[in-house]
Image (cartoon, grey):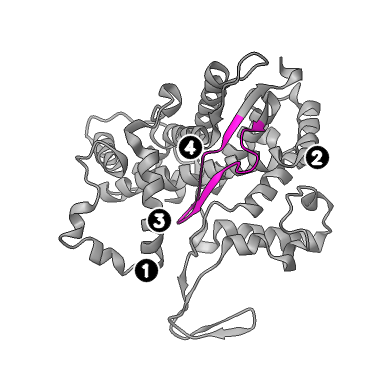
């Protein structure tokens, strides 16, 4: 799978162009339909729109074209509705994998999604099968996208179909959640938001539109904001169990018997006072800029566990970080956000992913962007 996620094995294909196209579609949607003024308020569920953006971005990067969520501005095939309602069940199966064999037996298997379905995961299954077979056809033209890189690396039909699922479900849920929680953190942390705006204003005149990934990586406060948001709100909520080898292993000075399932609480790691100090529950991007060398090394090591390690490392990490940095920059450069319901700004649920909904905000154009 690595060649497909590296973007280096497909004749000049790069992820950034696809992300840029959908980021411009995202801000265009906001400008057309959801920009409030002094005379008109246009509340928007930003949780839904970030999901649309993430889905279309992964579609463009992975399959050569977006699904169309941003263009049509609707939950196509009720995918997001069914995605949200299915996550708790997926969470149980991820913790107890043996349940999979039971679910696939009659009569429970009658409840599973099917390729013929017109909504939800079944619709995605049908799309995946048709899309892969079309790309594997003898007369299929070569494309510059992630799927072509997977084909070039020798994946068979079944493996390619699985890649469609992995890219669509994992790639959209994680990035959308990270983006909405970073924006929420900035809205509720005026000092941090002001510091980011100041950095953006200093750089905006020389930046590309959208900002390039290379340029985004030169902005220290933007990087600190993204790291801090991901630290506090890791998109993955599952424990990611790994099994200890038969001979056992020693972890942090403790011997763990062979066969033991060891999981990690990503949220707990991100809020550990041992790593982050007594203000671990405070959104403070400055911690990343003020830490000494040894402290920063420890912080980065803890932060990186959110993306896995070794052969379990998240292959989509470079794509996700590129997408998040670019989106945060462009959104904060253009808009001011105000929460509609301060007492309950967002609704979240914990399952395989941290999932959010009902993030109602009022978006206005920033004064220096008018």
In this rendering, would 369 be left or right of 3? right
Q: Is residue 54 left or right of residue 195?
A: left
Residue numbers of the magenta segment: 338-361
Q: Which residue position holds label 1?
A: 96
Tell me the mark number nearer the camera, choosing from 4 and 3: 3
- The answer to the question of whether label 4 and label 2 lie on touching residues, with beta carbons closer than 8 A, is no
The percent position of residue 361, horizontal first and vertical second, equals 60, 31
Give the residue drawn at x 71%, y 57%: 281
Q: Secondary structure at mark 4?
A: helix
Q: Which mark is residue 88?
A: 3
Residue 252 found in image quarter: bottom right
Residue at 60%, 84% in the rendered image: 254
Q: Give how far apart the Cα atoms at labels 4 and 2 are.
A: 27 Å
> In this image, 182 relative to 148: left or right?
right
Front in this rendered view, residue 202 or 86: 86
Q: Earlier in the sequence, mark 4 or mark 1?
A: 4
Query: Which numbered disc, 4 or 3, marks the residue that appears first in the sequence?
Result: 4
Q: Which mark is residue 52?
A: none
* Residue at image coords 36%, 57%: 89
Q: Which residue is mark 4?
A: 51
Q: Is residue 166 visible?
A: no
Mark 2 or mark 4, which is nearer the start of the sequence? 4
Q: Calculate the distance from the C-alpha at mark 3 to the C-alpha at mark 1.
A: 13 Å
User: For the residue labelled by badge 1, is the local secondary structure a helix, a strand or a loop?
Assistant: loop
- How far apart are the alpha carbons under marks 4 and 1? 28 Å
């Amino acid at each position: 799978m690595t060649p497909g996620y590296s973007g280096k094995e497909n004749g000049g294909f790069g992820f950034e162009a696809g992300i840029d196209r959908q980021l411009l579609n995202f801000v265009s949607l906001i400008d057309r339909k959801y920009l409030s003024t002094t005379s008109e308020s246009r509340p928007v569920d930003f949780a839904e729109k970030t999901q649309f953006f993430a889905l279309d971005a992964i579609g463009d990067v992975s399959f050569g074209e977006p699904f169309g969520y941003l263009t049509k501005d609707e939950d196509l095939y009720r995918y997001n509705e069914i995605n949200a309602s299915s996550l708790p069940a997926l969470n149980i199966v991820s913790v107890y994998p043996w349940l999979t064999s039971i679910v696939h037996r009659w009569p429970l298997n009658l409840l599973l999604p099917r390729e013929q379905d017109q909504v939800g995961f079944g619709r995605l299954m049908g799309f995946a099968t048709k899309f892969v077979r079309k790309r594997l056809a003898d007369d299929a033209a070569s494309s510059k996208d992630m799927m072509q890189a997977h084909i070039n690396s020798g994946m068979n039909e079944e493996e390619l179909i699985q890649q469609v699922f992995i890219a669509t479900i994992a790639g959209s849920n994680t990035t959308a959640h990270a983006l909405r929680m970073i924006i929420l953190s900035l809205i509720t942390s005026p000092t941090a938001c002001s510091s980011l705006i100041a950095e953006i204003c200093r750089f905006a005149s020389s930046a590309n539109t959208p900002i390039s990934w290379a340029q985004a990586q030169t902005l220290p406060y933007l990087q600190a904001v993204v790291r801090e948001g991901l630290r506090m709100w890791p998109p993955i909520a599952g424990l990611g169990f790994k099994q200890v080898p038969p001979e056992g292993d020693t972890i942090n000075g403790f011997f763990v018997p062979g066969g033991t399932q060891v999981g990690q609480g990503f949220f707990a790691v991100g809020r550990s006072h041992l790593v982050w100090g007594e203000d671990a529950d405070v959104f403070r991007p400055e911690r990343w800029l003020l830490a000494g060398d040894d402290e920063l090394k420890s912080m980065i090591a803890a932060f990186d566990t959110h993306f896995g390690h070794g052969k379990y490392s998240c292959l989509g990490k470079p794509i996700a970080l590129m997408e998040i940095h670019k989106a945060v920059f462009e959104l904060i450069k253009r808009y001011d956000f105000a929460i509609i319901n301060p007492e309950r700004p967002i609704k979240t649920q914990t399952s395989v992913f941290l999932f959010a909904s009902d993030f109602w905000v009022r978006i206005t154009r920033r004064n220096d962007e008018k």
